[in-house]
Image (cartoon, rainbow, N blue to C red):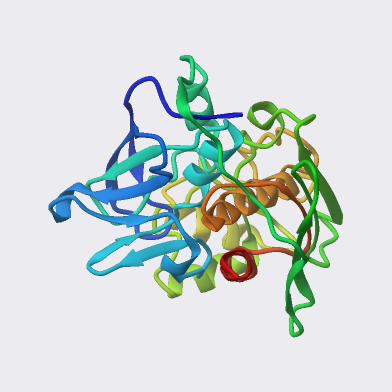
Amino acid sequence: MRQHTLSRTYAFEGKGLHTGVHTRMNVRPAEPGTGVVFVRTDLGGASVAAVAENVSSTARSTTLEQGQVQVHTVEHILSALTGMGIDNAVVELDNIEVPILDGSARPYVEAFSSDPLPEQDAPRICLSVDSPVEVRDEKSGSWVRIEPADEFSYELTVDFNSRVLGVQTLRWDASVPYASEIGICRTFVFFHEIEYLFANNLIKGGDVDNAIVVVEHPVTPEQVDAVAAKIGKAALAVEGNGYLSNVSLSFPDECGRHKMLDMIGDLRLCGGFLKAKVTAFKPGHGINTLTAKAFRKAMNK
């Protein structure tokens, strides 16, 4: 397997999910061995590499920081680059947060798949360890485990104790097409979390165009109208399946599939492509990135 990059530069722009700022972003080809690097053009071209040591926050998304450079919500573009088999890319932004676009990796997948992905004159560096790496959160019960394997595979189970979502188990390996099975799945939020997120200066750019809203508990029409007003939408309602209206699910387990999308992006912070078996229970950005850090330490040893 050889390294691959992009055949040209792809442009994206839109608001950030959490900051609400408008960002123009270019994803460019890169030389072999570059990996993924984020560049802030508004900061004179200062950059931060996509490795776990540079994670500075995992509050509802993954933030990278190095020196004066900070980039929020990197997980979706990292997931798309990984799922599409792209080793080397430079991601240029003129603001602090990657645009949320439709809440999934679909825009990246559609753009990158429109052209061939050039093979480069260097072998792909597949990352592995000799013994399992596992990180657990005793408080939440979450855990992620990476163990040696001949081929890569990811399997996760999500359980929010939710009557709407239930328990969802997903798997991604070479037999599962990322573009059509994982990459198109949007982010989600519980209705009862929205007030808290707004109060803590998060999801400033969130709306029902880029997020699935799960309505776990009974709500009044007035509560729905209040949220609709905050996100600039009108005539919203709760559907019988427990989701806010204006959302048509791509899959019954789209939320679980999005957690897989996120985990693939977060674990790209191991520094490349894993040649390992990944299993996880109730994964999230915090434990995903801690696992990536632990993996890199074990790999270096």
Residue 115 spot, x, y in % from top left: 46, 14
Image side of residue 265 versus residue 107, left or right:
right
Question: Can residue 52 be seen in the rendering of this structure?
Answer: yes
Residue at 39 percent of width and 58 percent of height:
72
Residue at 44 percent of width and 39 percent of height:
101
Rendered view: 80 above or below 121: below
Rendered view: 29 above or below 101: above
Question: Can residue 217 be seen in the rendering of this structure?
Answer: no
Image side of residue 192 versus residue 196, left or right:
right
Image side of residue 80 versus residue 203, left or right:
right
Q: Which of the pair 128/177 is nearer the observer?
A: 128
Residue at 60 percent of width and 55 percent of height:
267
Residue 71 spot, x, y in % from top left: 35, 58
Residue 159 spot, x, y in % from top left: 81, 63
Residue 228 spot, x, y in % from top left: 50, 52
The image quadrant where one finds the C terminus is bottom right
Q: Total label count?
A: 0
Report the residue that reaches farthest toward the bottom.
139
Report the residue that reaches farthest toward the left.
44
Q: Which of the pair 213/71 is nearer the observer?
A: 71
The image quadrant where one finds the N terminus is top right
Rendered view: 68 above or below 15: below
Rendered view: 224 above or below 182: below
Q: Which of the pair 133/144 is nearer the observer?
A: 133
Residue at 85 percent of width and 50 percent of height:
169
